[in-house]
Amino acid sequence: MKATMIKILGKIFIKSDYNGEFISELKHIIPVKNRRWNSAFPIGFYYRLMTSIPVEKLSDEEYILNNIKTLCDSGILKKTWEVDEIYFETVRDLCLKHFLEVYLQEDENITRIFASETLPYERVNNSQDKLIEEAEKYRPGEIVRFRWNYDTVSSLDNRKDELNFQFYSLNEDRWVFATNFSRGPREEIAPNISSSTVKFEVKYLDKIYMYNWEGAFYCPRNSMFKFKGSFYLVIDENEVETLGEDIEGWAKARQIAEYQKILLRLNEINRDRNNMEGLLRAKPFEIVDIESTVKPFAPDNSFEILE
């Protein structure tokens, strides 16, 4: 899971992978008046940016245009969180707590953040351990089967796909159709996901179709699928858990998908963390502030930063 914070024009924009716990805590800690979810390109967005520019910068056309260009190039004008800059430290620590990779972009420079004064690396590392531990609960397992049957009626709105199952394909990172009733249920859906049909009947009555299907799906344990607005998690043989309907189900499914993507990168993540821990253990130098009123003791392998 990755998050990038962009400090610009008195705001922090958070561009990140989906993380429900992060969003809940952000809403709980940051007052409503100081945060906003950007999901479109309203003119009000630009108005808020302009009104947050310092008075002394308002006449600096180059300053304004360059910052707006940076926002556009960063792709963060929609589907991102916008938070007042006074909450920067709070947002930074929230990101460190809920994401494996945290970056800060400022003046077109991007740096990786590993810790902060209020959230040292040891605590960040502990949060990452918990994140990986939670992800392990959703690791795809062996192929299991679950039976399914239903009677349903087609909608007069032909644009809707509510009658079709869709499975989440981790390798492709997308939802793929499991059935297509104009041609009948599909047998092969995606790698390691398939179906078998016991019974499939179609009746046409007064401009609508009536479908009756019985069969089984075969997929890895902890696979996700959705049907008629609800999201499901396949736990075991003939054991399916309902994640929820509509937005609630979508949010839980997005969270699980991000956890499963963590597992795909686990070797890379662990290698990165081990390298960082090795660097901290080595402690090749310490920084001494020579302008302090009390001159500190200079340890071995230290150097002084001179103005």
Image (tube, rainbow, N blue to C red):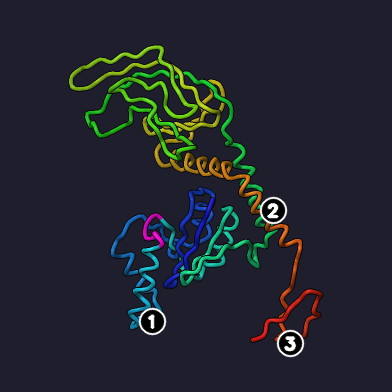
Q: Residue 121's mark?
A: none
Along the horizontal axis of the image, is 33 left or right of 278?
Answer: left
Residue hosting label 3:
293
The residue singled out by tag 1 in the image is 57
Side of 40 where 275 appears, left or right: right
Give the CA separation, mark 2 to mark 1.
44 Å
Name the amino acid, label 2: Asn
Q: Which residue has dot 2 on it? A: 274
- Point out residue 60 in the picture as x, y percentages from the top left corner: 35, 82
Q: Residue 139 location, x and y as percent? A: 58, 35
Q: Residues within 10 Å of mark 1 (few under 14, many from 20)?
A: few
The part of the chain drawn in magenta is 74-79
Local SS, label 1: helix
Query: Would residue 236 be counted in the magenta stretch?
Result: no
Q: Quadrant of residue 74?
A: bottom left
Picture coordinates of residue 68, whole percent (x, y): 36, 69
Calculate the distance from the C-alpha at mark 3 to the C-alpha at mark 2. 38 Å
Q: Tell me the quarter of the picture where residue 181 sits.
A: top left
Instruction: Return the x and y of residue 64 as percentages of the image width and height.
Output: 36, 75
User: Which one is nearer the viewer's eye here, 172 or 52?
Assistant: 172
Above or below residue 178? Residue 202 is: above
Q: Earlier in the sequence, mark 1 or mark 3?
A: 1
Give the crowd class for mark 2: few <14, some 14-19, many >=20 residues within 10 Å. Answer: few
Q: Earlier in the sequence, mark 2 or mark 1?
A: 1
- Residue at position x 39%, y 84% in the image: 56
